[in-house]
Amino acid sequence: MDTSRTDPPPPPPGGVLWTVAGEVRALLMLPAAFTMQVAHPAVAAGVDAHSVFRTDPWGRGERSLRSVQLWVYGGDAAAEEGRRVRRLHRDIQGVDAHGRRYHALEPAYYSWIHATGFPVYTYALGYLWRPLTKAQERCLYAEWLQVGRVLGIHDRDMPQTVEEFWPHYRKVLAEEIESTAVARELVATDVPLPAPTGGPLPVRLLVRAAWPLLRRLFLRFRAFVTVGLMPPDARAAIGLEWTDAQERRLRRFCRVVRAVVPVLPERLRYLPLAREARQRHRAAAR
């Protein structure tokens, strides 16, 4: 039986997410959201035991990015991707660092993974794009709720308004979030990291030869944007340090990003799934 009519649709074209989620600037925001997710002990335990983020970080990142893009730009494929994500997490369970049992699809844990995107967007866009107006923030939250529905999260497990979200978010920060081992690992600059394996052979050989230097530079940059683009209240809950000098460097970096990205051609400015969806939408509107 065809159940597609009951599938939750992705956020609509023309909204805030449609504009920003598929842009290259979104790549800079993802590490902050992921680190906030694994600062929850239950999520950290699941990632530590079941993820390949250490052995295949580039492949995992590519797959995760494609999944996120499908939630927004996937059209009819968005809901199926949401079901795939739930199937992937169905058997993930165990005991966290405090000896408490967890299951990846427990609503409190699964909804936290989803929830982190909204505060990261609202904070980081002020640096990388421009501060959201109150109307844009409300629009973004409504669209993020729709992403939650695509992921199979019930409305009863998500605050339904911005006014309800922020107290809930701060409560989780105060009562659940901590400096987990996985969160610390994601901002460390001295951890092992395999070289990327994709791309043309000459590029792979060049990267492999220069990887000792490139690895150090990449880890430092990842830690910089992870902590810098994370909302300060989350940063404090995890125990991450951020200095005035780092803040000044971040603002200088983001000024360059804001100047360069908007003038890039669409093929460079938007990621492939987003670019294709935008092209289809324009063609259908003619």
Image: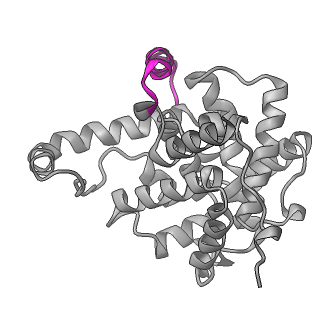
Left or right for 150, reference 5: left
Q: Is residue 256 magenta?
A: yes
Q: Is residue 228 above or below residue 78?
A: above
Left or right for 164, reference 209: right
Q: x%, y% of residue 128?
A: 55, 25
Q: Is residue 99 above or below residue 117?
A: below
The answer to which quarter of the image holds residue 219 is: top left
- On the question of residue 236 being in view, the answer is no
Q: x%, y% of residue 182?
A: 48, 59
The answer to which quarter of the image holds residue 269 is: top left
For the C terminus, the image quarter is top right
The answer to which quarter of the image holds residue 10 is: bottom right
Which one is nearer the viewer's eye here, 51 or 189?
51
Q: Is residue 76 above or below residue 281?
A: below
Question: Which residue appears at 36% of the width and 63% of the height?
Answer: 54
Left or right for 155, reference 266: right
Dominant secondary structure (helix, strand or loop) of the stretch shown in magenta: helix
Question: Which coloring applies here?
Answer: one colour
- On the question of residue 150 being in view, the answer is yes
Q: Is residue 120 magenta?
A: no
For the N terminus, the image quarter is bottom right
- Give the residues in magenta: 242-266
Question: Which residue appears at 74% of the width and 44% of the height?
Answer: 12
Q: x%, y% of residue 4?
A: 75, 71
Q: x%, y% of residue 279?
A: 55, 40
Q: How many marks?
A: 0
Q: Residue furthest front?
A: 286
Question: Which residue appears at 60% of the width and 76% of the height?
Answer: 89
Question: Which residue appears at 46% of the width and 18% of the height?
Answer: 263
